[in-house]
Amino acid sequence: MTSTADFLKPSGRGALVIDGKIAAAGVIEENRRNTQALIARGVKPGLAVVLVGDDPASGVYVRSKSRMAEQLGFHSVQHNLPADVAQADLNALIGRLNADPAIHGILVQLPLPKGLDTADALERIDPRKDVDGIHPVNAGLLATGAADRALVPCTPFGSMRLIEATCAALGRKVEGAEAIVIGRSNLMGKPMAQLLLAANATVTMAHSRTRDLAGVVRRAEIVVAAVGQPEMVRGDWIREGAIVIDVGINRVPTADGKYRLTGDVAFEEAVARAAAVTPAPGGVGQMTVPLLMANTIEAARRAAA
Ligand code: GUN
């Protein structure tokens, strides 16, 4: 992250806009330096990405991960398996990658095609190579306050970095702040709540069964929306001066038969009330692949220590 607040842009309509691309450029620069330092010690970070099936969106994500790994000078491998691969073959590939000393990070792109047991595959990944931070060992380390020994999932990790940098730029503290996380998924909501708790925020976890969600969100100085519902969080739910992190990326059909991407927060409405808001796209999403690389570098550094 850059030390100045150049990632915060005036919107001209109230809130500052948290520019994920500028924040991510700082992470990419850090990754370059850290990769060079490891390579100088004879350690080349190695990332294996496993794609099962031919889901086009997953294909796009996986290519961007492999591309950034190559640009950084990693040892980068991608395994494409057919949608009807046998569980035993997927598990055997994970076993081979666990045993390969040139590989420090293993990422199995989700969702897996129907018929495969996701938990069975993910729990076979060596936790030290689990750069998605999805293995129960890493979730457990984070939940027991040992984040320094865990690998943390990239989207909440990126969200937390944006929250910390924004708080610092605005002269605020995460410690003691009222924070709400909307959504309780294993890859986002739960680890996000743990990261905020580790930073001493007062954390509320809300979800689809929360009563009076608008009223609960209105208390929060930090709002993280990760529900996958286009523009569900309305402007009048937002407390004046809140920091709003929108993790959603939803496809909404348009009148001309195409679609547009939108977040979980009604952005223009939130801008009128918040102190700072991430756009979606262009916010948190920019941070995730660079932080996946940072996790791979960290896994390589630990393996070489
Ligand atoms: N699919 C969508 N997001 C993710 C992610 O963060 N990790 C993996 N492995 N698959 C995903």
Image (cartoon, helix red, strand yellow):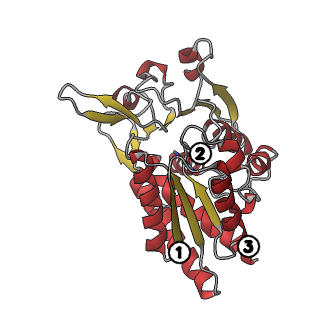
- Look at 63% across and 24% down and name the residue there: 206
Q: Nearer the viewer, residue 253 or 161?
A: 253
Mark 3 Cα within 10 Å, few/some/many (few <14, many 20+)?
A: some
Q: Is residue 190 visible?
A: yes
Instruction: State the mark number for residue 74.
Output: 1
Tag 3–tag 1 contact (CB < 8 Å): no
Residue at far left of view: 256
Give the x, y percent position of residue 149.
Answer: 77, 59
Location of residue 196 in the rendering, given as x and y in whole percent from the top left corner: 67, 41
Q: CA distance from mark 3 to mark 1?
A: 15 Å
Asked whether the beta carbons under mark 2 and mark 3 sit within 8 Å of each other, the answer is no
- Say which of marks 1 and 2 sits in front: 1
Which quadrant does the C terminus fall into? bottom right
- Residue situated in front as seen by the camera: 126 or 24: 126
The residue wearing badge 3 is 303
Residue appearing at x 78%, y 50% in the figure: 137
| Residue corresponding to mark 2 | 156
